Every structure is written in C-alpha cells, then in structure tokens.
Image (tube, coloured by chain):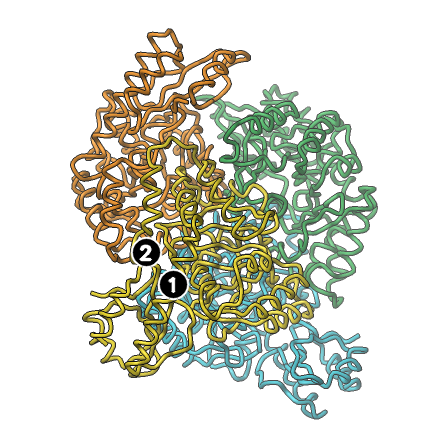
Chain colours: A green, B orange, C yellow, D cyan
Amino acid sequence: MLSFDCDYVAGAHSEVLKKLVETNMKPLSGYGEDIYCKSAREKIKKACNCENADVYFLVGGTQANLAIISSLLDSYEGVISADTGHVNGHEAGAIEHTGHKVIALPNHEGKISAEEIEKYIKTFYENDSHSHMVFPGMVYISYPTEYGTLYSKNELEKISAVCKKYEIPFFIDGARLGYGLMSKESDVTLCDIAKLYDVFYIGGTKVGALCGEAVVFTKNNAPKNFVTRIKQHGALLAKGRLLGVQFDALFSNNLYFEISKHAIQMAEKLKSVLTGKGYQFFLESPTNQQFVILENSKMEELRKNISFCFWEKYDETRSVVRFATSWSTAEADIEALKTFL
Amino acid sequence: MLSFDCDYVAGAHSEVLKKLVETNMKPLSGYGEDIYCKSAREKIKKACNCENADVYFLVGGTQANLAIISSLLDSYEGVISADTGHVNGHEAGAIEHTGHKVIALPNHEGKISAEEIEKYIKTFYENDSHSHMVFPGMVYISYPTEYGTLYSKNELEKISAVCKKYEIPFFIDGARLGYGLMSKESDVTLCDIAKLYDVFYIGGTKVGALCGEAVVFTKNNAPKNFVTRIKQHGALLAKGRLLGVQFDALFSNNLYFEISKHAIQMAEKLKSVLTGKGYQFFLESPTNQQFVILENSKMEELRKNISFCFWEKYDETRSVVRFATSWSTAEADIEALKTFL
Amino acid sequence: MLSFDCDYVAGAHSEVLKKLVETNMKPLSGYGEDIYCKSAREKIKKACNCENADVYFLVGGTQANLAIISSLLDSYEGVISADTGHVNGHEAGAIEHTGHKVIALPNHEGKISAEEIEKYIKTFYENDSHSHMVFPGMVYISYPTEYGTLYSKNELEKISAVCKKYEIPFFIDGARLGYGLMSKESDVTLCDIAKLYDVFYIGGTKVGALCGEAVVFTKNNAPKNFVTRIKQHGALLAKGRLLGVQFDALFSNNLYFEISKHAIQMAEKLKSVLTGKGYQFFLESPTNQQFVILENSKMEELRKNISFCFWEKYDETRSVVRFATSWSTAEADIEALKTFL
Amino acid sequence: MLSFDCDYVAGAHSEVLKKLVETNMKPLSGYGEDIYCKSAREKIKKACNCENADVYFLVGGTQANLAIISSLLDSYEGVISADTGHVNGHEAGAIEHTGHKVIALPNHEGKISAEEIEKYIKTFYENDSHSHMVFPGMVYISYPTEYGTLYSKNELEKISAVCKKYEIPFFIDGARLGYGLMSKESDVTLCDIAKLYDVFYIGGTKVGALCGEAVVFTKNNAPKNFVTRIKQHGALLAKGRLLGVQFDALFSNNLYFEISKHAIQMAEKLKSVLTGKGYQFFLESPTNQQFVILENSKMEELRKNISFCFWEKYDETRSVVRFATSWSTAEADIEALKTFL
C-alpha cells in the first residue's frame, strides 16, 4: 500500500531521532527548562532574525491554537478565520471550548482577504448594538492554507496593516509552515513571517518531528505567565526535552528547510505524474497537498493500492481527494504510484 | 417622541404590576419555591395541556438560552441555528462562552428548513473525520424569528421529525412567543408547541412582564439538578416571587394571549398605515416586528419624531429599519405616527 | 408563622414599589441606558463621594460575584476568600464554573486577616514551582460576613495595603452592605468602603429591592466592555429600568441607610429578647443575622410557630440556627416572637 | 552533579527507545488508530485482566486528569481530593479551568479515608441548601500519593464501597502507579486496581517513557465520543504511534513492572544510606519518593553536589526535601551519594 493520505505517516526524520537517542540518558531539567529547549529557542530566534521572540514548545497544532487564541483574546472577543480554517472545522470546537467564537468568513481557495477582514470589522463597529455582539479580537490564517494555497507577501502585509489599524493580533497557524516557505511560489521568508505576525508557530509534527510545534511570539508579547497557562491546559510536558531536542535538530544545519524542500519536490513530481495521466485538479496548490477530482468508481479502484484522503463530495458521481507528500516521501513512492494510476 | 423601537419600552402590564403590589409584603420562600411560582407553573402546564412539563423561571432570554443549551449539550456538541438566530449574533457569544459552537446555517427570511438541517447532519456523519468536528447536538429556532416571520405547523413537524431521527433535542426561543401564536398567520397553538418541542420558553420580558421567561421542558426532561445549574450561572433569583407573581398574572384570565393579540392588532394597523403611505417593506412579517426600507435622508427626518431601530444597510442610500409594536402600544400612537410619516 | 429565616422574605420597600408603579408606563431605553439608571448612578457616586466610580446594576449577588471576579482575574489566577465566603460554599461553584479557583483560607468567625492573606501570597511566590500553581489574583471578603460579623476599618486598611503591595484588586461582597454600615459596631462609612476597595457592590435584594445589586468600580477601573461581559453571562436586563428605578428610590432621601438602620434596631431587640430568655449565642454578631445554639428538641418545638434557618450541627444534640431581621421586620414580629420562645 | 530531584530526569528506557527507532519509518495511521496503539491496548487489558477496559493514550498527567474529570462530572459537580492531591495544588487550576471545583479534604500523609469521604457526602446531602452547593461527583486519589505513601487494599475497598453507595466514580491518578505496585508494602495488584476503580491511568512519563499515560476505563465506561473530547482539549496526537509504541514496549516482557521494581530497590538503598547517615525522615514512604528533614545550612551544602527537590518549610531553620529514584537511577548514583552526605 502506497501512503499519500497525510503528512504524518512516518515517525521522525533520522537526524531528529538520532539526537533523541544520543541525549536520551542525560539527566535534564523538566518543563522546557533544559539545555536543548534553550538551544532550540536560540536557533529559532536566529532563523527568524528576531531578537524579541518568545519561543515555547507545545505538543500539537490544536493545542497551540487553543493556547494562543484563548490567551490573547479577552472574554468577549472572537477570532476571525476563513470558514475552512482548521480552528473552525476540524478541532472539535476547541476554540469554542475555551469560550470564544470563531468568526468565520467565506474563503476563496482557503484564503480570506484584507478587504474582507476590514469590511467585517468596520461593519461591526458601525453597528449600534455591537456591544451585544462578539468583538473581533484577532485574525487567524493558515500558511499554507488547508487547501495548500499560499498568501503572497503583499496579501499578508495588507492583512497585517488591518490588524495594526484595529489593534488586534495577527496569528498564523504554521502546522505546515516549512512546506509553505519552501514552495516555489512563496515570496516570503521565515524572517518576513516573524516581522508580519504577532505570533505564529512552526509546525514540527508534520515536518520531521514525532510531535511538537514551536510557538513564536515575535515582540516579547507572550501572554503573562504563559507557562502557567500551558500547564493549565494540560499541555506542559514534564520531559520538555522531547520537544527541545527535536527542534534543536530541526534547526541545525538548515534541516527544517531542507526536508521541507524535499517534500515540495516530491509534490511537484506527483503533480506532473497526475497531470500526465490526465487527472483533473480541484484547485492549483503550490505546496505539499494536492487536490484531485475523481470519479467515485475510479476512487474505489485506486484505493486498493494507494491510500489517500477523501476530502469532500464534488458532485453526485465525483469526489475531491487529497494526495499529500512530506519529508518522508521517497521518489520510489512516486514511481510506484505511476503504475497504479 | 413616539416609541416604536422595540417591544420592551414600557414596564409591566397593569394586571401584572397590580399583583406585584398586592403580594408585596407577604413573607414568601425564596428561590422559586413560593406559592406564586407554584401556581404559575400549574397554570402554564394547563395552558400547554402538558402534564409532564417541568417549568422554571429565568430572568431573561440570553440567560434562558445559555442555561438550556449548555445543560442539554454534551461538551463536544454544538447547537444548529439560523445564522440570524439570536444566539448566533446578538448574545455577545454567550453560547460559545459556555464552551459550545453555534453551528450557523444560512437563513431564509430568518428561517431554516428541515431539509437543510437534515442535510447538515447527514453530511456530518458521512464525513470520515467527523470525530474531529463539533457534533450537531440540538436544533434551535426562534418563534417568531428575528425577522418576525413564522414557521408553519408543517415546517415545525418536519424539523421535529429530523430531531427525533437523530435523537437531538428541538428547542424554541420564544422570547416573543405570544406575538407569534396570536398572529393571524400562525397555525400552531401553545399546546402544539408543547408537543413538538423538547424545550421552549415563553417570553415575559417582551410580553407584559418587567422581566422573566418561563422555561418549559415538555417531557419531564429538565436536566438533572437544573436549579443548581441555574444557580451556577448566577441566574437564580433570591426573590423568585418576582417571576412567579408576574407569570401567575400573565397566565390568569388569558392575559398573556389577550395582550399578545393586542400587539398584533397594533402591528396590522401599523402595516396598513405604512402601506397607505407607500412605504416599501423589506419582507412580509405577520407579527409585531415590521421591517421597512427607507432612504437614509428620510430615515434621518423621521427620527426627529419617531424612535425606531436601524436594522441593517440595504444599499448605499437606503437602510432597513424596524418598527415594533407590543402589548403597550396604544392606538393613539399609531394615529400620531400617521402625521409624521 | 413568624418569619425570621432570611432577609429576603418580603417584596420591595414601599417607596421602591411606589416608584416602580409611577414610572411603569414611561417609554424608556433598554439595557441600563435609561434616565433612572443614570440618575441612580449619580446618586450612588455622590453617596460614595467617589467621582471616579463606574456603576453597573446586576440582578443578584452570585451574578455580581461571578461577573466581577471572572472579569478581573487572568485565566491562571484564583480569588482568595475565607472558607466560609459565599463564593466558596453557597454559589454552586459559580466561580469555578468561570474557570477560576477559590483559594479558601480558614476563617475566624467568618473573617480572614491581612496577615494570613499576606502569608499565603508570600509563601506562594517563595515556592519554586509556583508557576504550576494557581496565582492569588484577588481578595474577596463579605461585609458583613456570612456570620454577621464585621471587619474594623483598621482591619480593612491592612488588607487593602496587602492588596496594593501585591497589585491585586480588593473586592467586597456587599449583599448586606447596609446592615453592616448601619451596625453600631461599624466604624466605616460608604465613603471609606469606596476608598479602600477596588470594587464592591451595594446589595439591593436583601435591603429593600425586589432584586438588584449595584456594582461599583471605584477607580474608573471597570473591565473594558463590561456591558458586553455582562451580556455574555446572560446578566443584562432588557428592561434595565427595573434596577435603575429601584436604586434611584433606595438612594433618595437616605432610604437605603434608614431601612438598614431599622433592620439593625430590630436585630438588637431580637438579641435582647433572646438573651432575656436565656438563649446561648453561637457568636457575637453586631448585624442583622443572629446565630443561636438550640437543643434539637427545642428547635423542633420552635419551628411550629417560627420559621428560622438551620445553619449547622453544633454537636450530637444541639444545632446552630439563624434568626435574620431585615428592613421588613416589624416590631410586632419581635413581640410575637417573645411569646413563642 | 547527582540527580535525585525527580523521576523524569532521563529520556526513555532503552527498550522503549529501541522500539521507537525500529518502527520509525513505518507508515502508520494517525490519531491512535495504528497497530501499536491497538497492540498496547490489548496488552494493557491483559495485564489488568480486564476485558471490559477502554484504553486511551494521553501525553501527560495533568492532561489525563483534566480530560477524565471534566468528562465524568456533570457541570454542577466537583471532585473530592486530598488537599495535597496533585489536581488541587500543582496543576495550575486545570480542573477549575474546566469549570469544576476540587473539593479538598484534609490529608493524612497524603491520604484521605473512606470515613472522611462518606462523612463529607452525607453532610452535603443532609444540608437543606445543598442545591446551592457543588455536588460531590467523583473521588480522586493518587496511588502512590504525592508523599509517596500507599493505600492498603482494604482502604481502597472501603473507598470504593462509598463511591458505589453514592453512585459516583472512583478515579486513581497513577502517574507513579508502577512505583506503588512494586513497593514491598503494596498489597494490591494491577488487576485489583482495575477491579476497584472506575477509571485510572498507568503513568508512563515517570516510568520509562518519554511521555504518555494510559487511561483505563475499567467497565466500558469511557465517556461517549471520548476521542472527540480529547481532541477538543488539544490532547490528541496526530502521531498517536508515539504513545502506542512506547506502551507496547512497556507492556512487553513485564518491562513496566521490572523497571518499577528497580526504582523501588534503589529507593530502599537510598533509604538505608540516609538512615545510616542519621538523617531524619519527614514520614515513612515505601515508594520511590523519600522525604527528609534537613537543617537549612546542610541543605545548602548538599546542593553543591546533589540535586534534590525542596518540598516545604519545616520550621524556621529546617526544610523538608525530596529525594526521588526512578527506573533510570543507577546503583552507582547511590554509592556516589554516600560520599556527599
């Protein structure tokens, strides 16, 4: 069975695993205060070229989203997101569970625009009874989006300007950040991200780690006592080393970027194979997730040899499915895929 | 200044106030255990022809909505509502504050249909990853809706059937229930409501009381220890008599229905006056709220003598405004209105 | 049956009721923006001699407690209270339901001291792992306490100083504030209260109103968008007039203080009657609640003619019971009581 | 520096790590549905001799505690715990953050008794106004306790009987379960635990794993849709394999018990060394945590070569400190310790 169903099918990258093994028996402090966490923090700050960054390690994406969003919002505020945003649809209501509304705006291929965000906020404040409504308190986007698409630098700058104007934080869910930054179509760097956003996270789970996301508050703007907040959510690992060691490896020798680039190369190969075979794409994605429209009968046939992800119904007889590559995808997998398509 | 801006401009109906005065110095038990609460409960059960009703009195609509919804949902469930539903837009995120998502479906003149609800639920359960999503755990509608429109008995029965099929409760926000039931276009009675719904409330605040909503669980299905839940929300009045006495008066001598009917008659007069003057309606409302499209200049002019409610922008030069009648609207008000239109 | 079981057995004071009747049909703005709310706010600010006060009206004590405490605490903070504090024991976990721990310190006749509070806070910050603990974020006391006892001005000043030192707000639950201030043993005035506290409320429910507590933030320190927060808790009355009119009456002609004084006079008479009959007091209370130790058999006998409140078991054969007076207690009640003791 | 400060200073046991390495590149399903999670579940059920067990893997102890407790309690219920219970003091208010009170009873060397629990519950229900209070909805104990002490089988049976009588679940925090079961003073087995409790967890983080706790609902009584609840708390790992593989290794070849036994042997050696050197114990602990009273000056001196944990002030000149052993403690460490004491 060929695995293209998601970007978390394998364990950790060999360099990451090696470091876990090497450091395994060293006695280390708990709760993120060990030397590897400290080293990883410094490396990330350097990679972001952001001296004022506060860096924290959390286990997963939903956890990072809920810890960040609930810490930055006041009780009467909600977070603006595309309706396709991960926080809106696929986190089992984790944001609402912390007491906050996800204010969902209609997406365009997974994206929302600065104009739409500003229009929403303006209309809100013009409404006489807005004190009876949820205040827009934050903007959340995913980079890349849930559909694999990317915001251009210009689009991000415009959203960032709206956030500044209304004094609300701009937050990026970077569960797949590496796959966005390494896309040929990306015109932003990690340093740009650190400049444009108030807070973002660098996904490890989907990019080479067993688990872990590195949360970066870019302006020494981590919420007061953020460690206590994390603890309160049951999200503080006793053996913080597990995250520190992994991110230390990922941010050594450009590893995070190299393995992300590999995944993109595999995605391009995949794309060209699919195109060659005459498959129809649902949308144009420049990152590691590719969405294809299949006849339902074809879908069932392919499933015998390939695992991929059903995404949504397209019409009565066709479905949208997702093929994902990752750091662990081998060229041989793509070659093998050809024979089954 | 003529007051048509809402249905809570006056205090209590004279009969209600009289009873508050008469009973004022009687020493009574607290927390809803007094004889008037008990009497009001019995009268409401009788008016609903529903022996299995559990009746509780809460101070206001948002409070009733959040207490009911949060008590009936499991932590991973959300409530389905029209996007125009009061719980979705105008309660400052009270539902999300209790930890639950409002699952907003697009409205049609304030309504959602059984077909749309069922489609949503079916699609949810067909989704392979629905265990990562918010479960649809309840259906909420307003009767009449926020646009003054009504569901027919047939429409309600169909929604009720969907709820039964998927074993989720069907809940009506009856903040303006009287104005719905007394509409000429209504084909349901209070007894029908009690049969079709698992829980609803009979609005007092907007229909003759100083405050208060009577929550009715129709199948002895009040959540366990509901009084403790109410207390936990800070919603249990020490002097429960304030609510009991008022509802006892409202459900004596058919008062609740008589004063609701009066409001409807005033709305019809209002409608005919507006029609006569050539005003354009935003939609056809058979209840006490009337929505009219005004040129913005006209709107400003009218505001000098009449208070009404700006509802939403219609286009660049026109607005939708609301005129509301209530139990306290006098015929003289309508007559006076004529001279200003 | 003679009623001494609590201080909320009757409706509203006649002056309060009269004003409700007089203003009943006036069309007024909703949600606390009417002229009576405004007038009441001004009168309260004047009575407190506190120009910087932000005043809000809420329906009841638990509601006031939870709205204030949850708005002023950060998510990782708890509120310090005597273990006998109302928020700790008798509000069905309302504070915890908003996500915050009540940090309960052992009481002395219902009180906690500045020394004990400071010791707790100091020990907390000295603890190496305090970032894994709930931060002390606020001090809550009741005046008078749940046992009817009073803090002296000196005691309050010392607690206030500790709060200032650790930069946490000092909050008083004044559900029975009038009965405290009018006690002969009280050496504080309403103006002192406004100076010493960051926030407090003036109880109406137990002192002459049908319902209502006036929350006073003394330093223009109301939490941002407090109205929206109140709305979110389902605690914003559409007919805010109900509270405004009542507090306007209570703060006209010194009414609040006069009727509180009456309750204290009745309590003194009650005390002297009980003493005369040889009853044993559980503790010395200078306010409207009197705690007496009764043989269980005697308790059952008295219950035939007098309603009072069982408080707690004293030993195997005796119980502590509470007799409460209020603004509505008549001298005749005390006289009648004599014959049954 | 010799490390005795806690039981999470090292990474994973070599067998656990080996299995992580071996399985690393296998493509596996996410979210706990992989073959290792399944295998680990079966091995745990077998070790518990409990066919009706529902087993889930969570990342850490606080997370397990909050997910279990908040899922099993109704909104108006709290959890009974010793005041020294981890959930009461050292989880940053995680339980309260989910909306529930921790009902803290005074501990005896970390323990509470069946009699005390029953007395609390009985008194609660006898209280006339218990509907205004937090209902006792669950009993939580730690095995071993935070002071390293153990409940006897008889003590556990008696608490279990109280829970059955009042129909509330009995829950054990087993963060150090192995160290309890392998103590010479323990008279219970894992099978006994599975019989006596409704839910417990088997700590991995402190017993050989990098992270992870195995939650066991013993009577197919996992809360409905528990995976969705876990997701909602941000506690569902995409790479569930990380937990499955580790527990699969821990429950192969009796590893969990063998390494726990080793820690206990080291603790015994430690104890005898400390005794030999004339150190005074704070209490008698039969498990891997040993509490010693030190002169403050001595404490500072020892700290130069040994890391241990300050526990609490004993008196003005002395402190209680904790020495912990674990699966990773080597005999050489104990030998080395001797020379520094």
Name the chain under label 1.
Answer: D
Residue pointed to by mark 1: D135
Q: Residue at x 73, y 82 (%)?
A: D334
Left or right of A247? Residue B89 is left
Number of numbered discs: 2
Mark 2 Cα shell of 10 Å, populated few (<14), some (14-19), many (≥20): few
- Amino acid type indicated by mark 1: Phe
Name the chain under label 2.
Answer: B
Q: Position of residue B106 (x, y in %)?
A: 44, 25
Q: Residue at x 61, y 19 (%)?
A: A278
User: For numbered disc 2, what is the local secondary structure?
Assistant: loop
The relative height of residue C205 versus residue C31 in the rendered view (above or below) is below
Which numbered circle lies on residue B225? 2
Left or right of B117? Residue C296 is left
**A206 or D160, which is in the foreground?**
D160
**A132 or B134, which is in the foreground?**
A132
User: For numbered disc 1, what is the local secondary structure?
Assistant: strand
Q: Toward which corner of the image does residue A20 lie, by quadrant?
A: bottom right
Is residue B269 visible in the rendered image? The answer is: yes
Q: What quarter of the picture does the N terminus of chain B occupy?
A: top left
The relative height of residue B159 versus residue B319 in the rendered view (above or below) is below
Q: Position of residue A317 (x, y in %)?
A: 45, 22
Q: Position of residue D306 (x, y in %)?
A: 77, 77
**B310 or C180, which is in the foreground?**
C180
Q: CA distance from mark 1 to mark 2?
A: 10 Å
Residue contact between numbered discs 1 and 2, judged by CB atoms under 8 Å: yes
Q: Toward which corner of the image does residue A277 lie, by quadrant?
A: top right
Is residue D33 visible in the rendered image? The answer is: no
- Amino acid type indicated by mark 2: Asn
